[in-house]
Image (cartoon, rainbow, N blue to C red):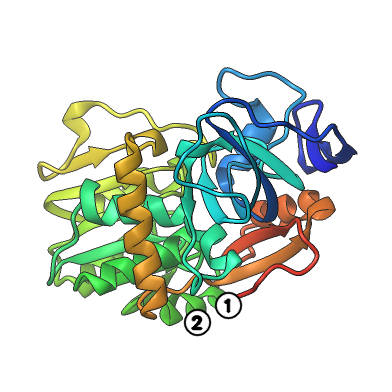
Amino acid sequence: MQAIVIEELGGPEVLVAREVPEPEPGPGEILVDVTVAGVNFMDTGVRRHGPVGGTVPFVPGVEGVGVIRALGAGVTGFAVGDRVAWVYAYGSYAKKIVLPAASAVSVPPEISDEAAAGVMMQGITAHHFTTEVYPVQDGDVVLVHAAAGGLGRLITQIAKHRGAEVIGVVSREEKVAPAKAAGADHVIVSTGDAFVDGALRVTGGEGVHAVFDGNGESTFRASMHALRRNGTLLYYGPFIGKVPKIGMQELPRSIKICYPVFHDHITTRSELLNHTADLFTMIASGKLTVAVGGRYPLAQAPQAHRDLESRRTTGKLLLLAAETPSTED
């Protein structure tokens, strides 16, 4: 079968299409024919630095959707032919994948392959950020960096659904329209710290209740200064740049800083099911839209990474492992 294999760490060129043996499911595992795999910034970091606790060669990608082809011993709750989505299962950039059944969820018939694949990593992240790390409330003002990107658009939509006023920050003028389409009430075109004045202007000088910042070190300190007293900064940009270092006495206005890593989003299967059930319900009702920013054949994974790292894309980037996956624009 075809898979994207990383045999040495480096730039997008190390993502190479190879023929590899078809995997077989062990106890508690399922074999899935992949239709769509999601592309994430996390994948670019793993491409450069390697998977945690792993070595080369390996098949990257941690999320996707497909159809169960075989069940390993002891698997219950699934059947051959079921359509499932998964998250945090390495090996998703491939025609087939073996993964723990506990990492998979059933996909309702009204949810497209692309929508399901597009919310397993970024959707769960956005849901965890806005409902648990900082439970957005009616009347809050929040600032979302990279508001035209895949994760930023989902955070914006969920925050709006929960009653917030959203200030979106984008890096280029052409990204203003996608951010507004996601529901941002105000959109600021900014690089560096230029967004702070705009955020303070919108809030009458008070600052925002929460900042969702995945830009890395370049905006970290500025984001602190966009917060009001007791505000919350959610920082989640470890693969984009250096991890910022800060002394406790540097924190202004009694703000709180959180570093929400993905493993804390879903520590149990019940949390996985609860997050995805809510996301699928929101998609089915039209309250949440997965905007696809690019579709690539599996072999074009290097180009998908180049486009993602260029910061010129908007929405979710997807790899199409099957010939005719269901789509959603």
Q: Is residue 70 left or right of residue 126?
A: right
Q: Amino acid at mark 2?
A: Ala
SS under mark 1: helix
Query: Foreground residue, 215 or 88?
Result: 88
* Residue 174, numbered label: 1
Identity of the residue drawn at 47% across and 55% down = 106
Identity of the residue drawn at 36% across and 79% down = 285
Mark 2–mark 1 Cα distance, whole angstroms, equals 7 Å
| x and y percentages locating residue 224 in the rendered image | 26, 47
Query: Foreground residue, 1 or 240?
Result: 1
Circle 2 sits on which residue?
177
| x and y percentages locating residue 243 in the rendered image | 44, 32
SS under mark 2: helix
Q: Is residue 133 above or below residue 19?
A: below
Q: Is residue 311 above or below residue 230?
A: below
- Would residue 129 be seen by someone viewing this image from the given angle? yes
